Amino acid sequence: MSRFTSPDFLRQAGDKHVRAKPPPPVNLVSASITRLRSFHLEGKDHFAVDRDLAVKAERAVPGFVDIVLGERAFLQRAVRHLAAEVGIRQFLQVGSGMPAPGDPHEIAHESVPDARVVYASDDPVVLTNHLALIRDGRTTTAVRGGLGDTHSLLHDPESSQLLDLDEPIGLLLTGAVSHLSDFEAAARGIAELRDSLAPGSHMALSHYCRPDPARSPKSALRAEQLQRLFTEHLGHGYWRSEKEICSLFDGWETVAPGLLQTQKWHPLQVDPPVPGSYAMPQRNQQLIIGGMGRI
């Protein structure tokens, strides 16, 4: 039995698990980044084409899975920090992936049991899976949308029921921009969200990073190899410079410790491990960076 279909996971997801409509058709010809991540997170929502890409990524850059797990741990630490330390009570994750144990609503509910979480994705399969596992819409929901139409995203009837735009919101953008080909459009979408959110709102963002070849030639080569592989098989997946990624925080006040390797952002060293305590090996730490900003 997969841990994603175990009784414990279903209990955590809620008491009602009803699909409102049949699941959308699944593309079994091309790999999907959401299904690739599901594979690396030991989920069940992946197929042979996704597993084949995982093998190719591991061959191209040994330890690619480190990047996936490291980014996931950064997201979990960021949500815990915002809920427990900052007092954020509502969250919007744009570009969410397949449901998995340790998702933002579970982390937020550790310290804020009535925290409200909206998952947004352009992938109908992701939405179907989220909607099948949420409780009853009182604290968690999933809506279709992304950075390309932020007004519709914020004013969707479902998200409007949970998100109060007059109160601070935790905006979660982990992995979303890395897979958008139009970087300038993504930056505009982030700026539009920033201008729509209340003072005290925070943004947690991570992105694949292409290190300076002059300083880190081996890591820069790994980034180039992964980008070439991903754009060939997914049509997207971009390792951008630290300067480019930093520009996404324009208009936000950077929260300490700043924009840096995700492994170095408030790392957890606890035993037994908890969500967010995964420690990335050194080999690929430069290939994923993240940080937090506030209004």
Image (spheres, helix red, strand yellow):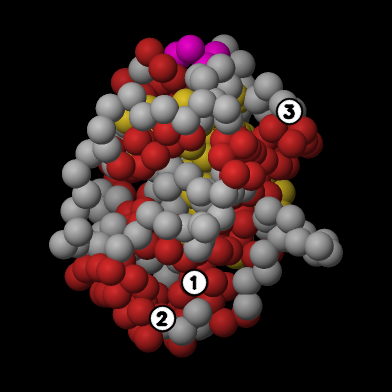
Q: Is residue 240 visible?
A: no
Q: Residue at x 25, y 53 (%)?
A: 181
Q: Secondary structure at mark 1?
A: helix
- Whether the residues at callouts 1 and 3 have beta carbons within 8 Å, the answer is no
Q: Residue at x 41, y 17 (%)?
A: 158
Determine contact: label 2, label 1, CB under 8 Å.
yes
| Marker disc for residue 65 | 1
Q: Nearer the viewer, residue 293 or 80?
A: 80
Distance of mark 2 from mark 3, alpha carbons?
38 Å
Could you tell me how many numbered marks the image carries? Answer: 3
| Amino acid type, residue under disc 1 in the picture | Val
Residue 49, x across and y down, in percent: 25, 68
Q: Residues within 10 Å of mark 3 (few under 14, many from 20)?
A: some
Q: Is residue 153 above or below residue 30?
A: above
Q: Dot 1 surroundings within 10 Å: few (below 14), some, or many (20 or more)?
A: many
For the residues marked 1 and 3, what is the alpha-carbon distance in whole angstroms? Answer: 31 Å
Task: Tell me which numbered mark, 1 or 3, is placed earlier along the sequence.
Answer: 1
Kindly identify which residue carries mark 3.
112
Q: Amino acid at mark 2?
A: Glu
- Amino acid beneath label 3: Val
Residue 93: x %, y % from top left = 48, 37
Q: Which residue is situated farthest in the left direction here?
A: 29
Residue at 63% across, 71% down? 280
Is label 2 in contact with label 3 (beta carbons under 8 Å)? no
- Residue 239 pos. (x, y %): 38, 66
Pointer 2: what residue? 58
Residue shown at 51% from the left, 68% from the top: 67
Range of magenta residues: 160-165
Residue 142, position in %: x, y? Answer: 42, 29
